[in-house]
Image: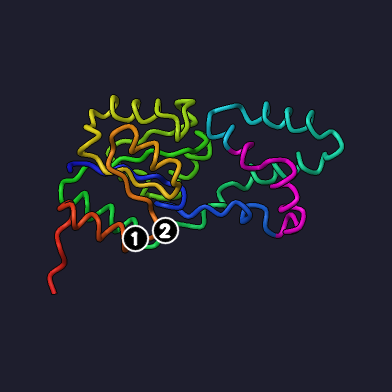
Amino acid sequence: MSAVVLDIGNVVLAWDPVAAVAGRVSLAQWEEFVLGAGFTELNARSDAGEPFEVIVRDLAAAHPERPDWVEILRTYRRHHTESLPGPVPGVPELIEDLLAQGVAVYALTNFDAGPFEAARRRFPVLDRFTGVVVSGRERLVKPDPAVFDLLGERFGLEAARTLFVDDCPDNTAAGAACGFRTHLFTGVGRLRAELCEHGLLPAPVD
């Protein structure tokens, strides 16, 4: 294998959405919002590149009795950077080790374009990739096979020689269906072990 593609959320950077509203919204309010307003779906729309104000408008129209949900979503958006507490321990070092071995390292992320740029300004690790595909820019999100096709075409990747790493089983399954080798991320130790087994990293010297 000759290249590695990493997801970003909860692979390269920890993502904890409640941290963006902590101290501003009670946990009970947040949990009610997540379930009642469908936060996962709203966030997916942002990742797909829909304008935030359109999403807010639709939420207000769907739940006119809950203006507080609109304010919670706006609060989350305003403080999005606080939902990213920092890099996943050990992953920035792993990226540097791969680059030192001459391995091209790419990112394929479901991430709203604006918040991604804000994250890049905070976390230098996001500038270490050989190339990045951001769903919010492309209006394509994992696990859509089209985004894997775009990744391969844009960077000239041979899927069978590329390891795709993601923490979501639906995404790794989609990558595998597109011909990529895949790794379901559960921690940096297991990922490093697999990279060593594939010869992308050297075995440590005792």
**Badge 1: residue crowd in 10 Å (few <14, some 14–19, many ≥20):** some
- Where does residue 50 sit, x and y in percent of width and height? 59, 27
Question: Residue drawn 33% across and 49% down?
Answer: 183
Residue 28 location, quadrant: bottom right
Left or right of 26 on screen, residue 144:
left
Q: Magenta stretch mostly in which secondary structure?
A: helix
Asked whether 46 or 116 is in front, the reply is 46
Residue type at tag 2: Val
- Where does residue 15 sit, x and y in percent of width and height? 52, 52
Dot label at residue 88: 2
| Residue at the spot of label 1 | 188
Q: Which of disc 1 and disc 2 is earlier in sequence? A: 2
Question: Residue drawn 42% across and 56% down?
Answer: 87
- Please tell me whether residue 18 is drawn above or below residue 111 in the rendered image: below
Question: Residue drawn 33% across and 55% down?
Answer: 92
How many numbered tags mark residues here? 2
Cβ atoms under marks 2 and 1 closer than 8 Å: yes
Region in magenta: 23-43
- Where does residue 168 sit, x and y in percent of width and height? 45, 47
Left or right of 58 on screen, residue 112:
left
Question: How did the renderer colour the structure?
Answer: rainbow
Residue 42 location, quadrant: top right
Residue type at tag 1: Val
- Where does residue 141 sit, x and y in percent of width and height? 47, 32
For mark 2, give the secondary structure: loop
Q: Quadrant of the N terminus?
A: top left
Q: Quadrant of the C terminus?
A: bottom left
